[in-house]
């Protein structure tokens, strides 16, 4: 697998994690209360943190030599 293709998959997984985080936070704010709300909110926060780190890695690793 080439470096460019690997970076594409990493970026795509980060975007997927962002979608999961958005839907998790929507679920926790509209349907849940108490401890389950806190757990789902923490999960959403963790997904967004990991996605941000992955995007930073992709952006700051620079262009791929073709």
Image (cartoon, rainbow, N blue to C red):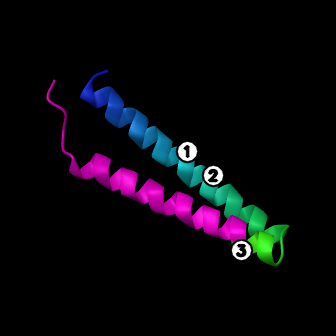
Q: Residue furthest top?
A: 1
| Residue found 18% across the figure and 44% down from its top | 62
Q: Is residue 12 above or below residue 26?
A: above
Q: What percent of the width, then of the height, locates residue 43?
A: 63, 62
Q: Earlier in the sequence, mark 1 or mark 3?
A: 1
Whether residues under marks 3 and 2 lie with C-beta atoms below 8 angstroms apart, the answer is no
Q: Main secondary structure of the magenta part?
A: helix
Q: What percent of the width, then of the height, locates residue 15?
A: 50, 46
Say what secondary structure mark 3 lies in: helix
Say what secondary structure mark 1 lies in: helix
Q: CA distance from mark 1 to mark 2?
A: 6 Å
Q: Which residues are magenta?
A: 39-66
Would you name the residue on which mark 3 appears? Answer: 38
| Residue found 37% across the figure and 34% down from its top | 8
Q: CA distance from mark 3 to mark 2?
A: 16 Å
Say what secondary structure mark 2 lies in: helix
């Amino acid at each position: 697998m080439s470096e460019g293709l690997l970076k594409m998959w990493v970026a795509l997984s980060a975007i997927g994690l962002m979608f999961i985080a958005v839907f998790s936070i929507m679920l926790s704010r509209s349907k849940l209360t108490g401890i389950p709300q806190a757990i789902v909110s923490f999960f959403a926060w963790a997904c967004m943190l990991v996605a941000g780190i992955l995007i930073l890695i992709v952006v700051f690793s620079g262009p791929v030599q073709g």
